[in-house]
Image: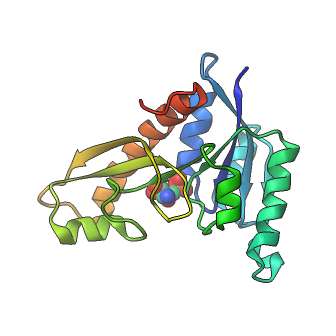
Amino acid sequence: MKKRVAILISGRGSNMTALIAAASTEDYPAEIALVVSNRPDAAGLHRARADGIPTAVIDHTQFGGDREAFEQALDRKLGEYRIDIVCLAGFMRLLTPWFVERWSGRMLNIHPSLLPRFKGLDTHRRALAAGVKRHGATVHFVVPEMDAGPIVLQDSVAVLENDTEQTLAARVLELEHQIYPRALRAVAQGLTKV
Ligand code: GRF
């Protein structure tokens, strides 16, 4: 039985697209059963619909700052679709410990740095400023602390002399599109190391 996966997005959804493409192959151990966005205008929603994936919008602004009510609506939606694994892919909401605990060991995130370095935002700019020679991306299980949690897979690229934030981000994004499908495959197969 393939694992049923929901991808949570807030924006363009290029990692989502990579996961959908990987999961469209017959031998992949997971199927993308749902894409959820907290923003009605997320570009990724169009792409998911074009690929025939069910989508849902749970607009956090409709919950008047009540994070738990938002997450309960989200959790109900995931239940409706009998979701086994949640993949955060550019989902720009912090999740409460309640939701994180509920999905503990079943929720992945991708972060554009070699964790534990450069948690948070603007990772490429900060990596350039720090002068690191390699930079990359990490897929990890989600725990209550942001950008922490057991690492499933990470990979890196060389930082080049003339890299800008944009060129570095583009190379890391390509890497993200490779490692997220591999990490999800491993997790769906019940392996945590790739
Ligand atoms: C990616 O860089 C991901 O690592 C980060 O947010 C970005 C989302 O990009 N968490 P996309 O929406 O998948 O194109």
Is residue 34 visible from the viewing direction of this image? yes
- Please tell me which residue is depicted at 60% across the width and 44% down the height of the picture: 105
Image-based side of 167 in relation to 179, left or right: left
- Across and down, in percent, residue 120 comes to 42, 69
- Residue closer to the observer: 151 or 124: 151
Image-based side of 94 in relation to 66, left or right: left
Image-based side of 25 in relation to 80, left or right: left
Seen in the picture, residue 29 relative to 171 is either above or below; the reply is above
- Residue closer to the observer: 126 or 69: 69
- Please tell me which residue is depicted at 11% across the width and 59% down the height of the picture: 161
Image-based side of 148 in relation to 100, left or right: left
Seen in the picture, residue 105 relative to 133 is either above or below; the reply is above
Colour convention: rainbow
Is residue 59 visible from the viewing direction of this image? no
- Across and down, in percent, residue 162 comes to 14, 61
- Across and down, in percent, residue 77 comes to 84, 52
Seen in the picture, residue 1 relative to 77 is either above or below; the reply is above
- Across and down, in percent, residue 99 comes to 70, 60
- Please tell me which residue is depicted at 39% across the width and 56% down the height of the picture: 112
- Residue closer to the observer: 150 or 123: 150
Circle count: 0
- Please tell me which residue is depicted at 65% across the width and 29% down the height of the picture: 30
Q: Quadrant of residue 5?
A: top right
- Residue closer to the observer: 45 or 94: 94
The quadrant of the picture occupied by the C terminus is top left
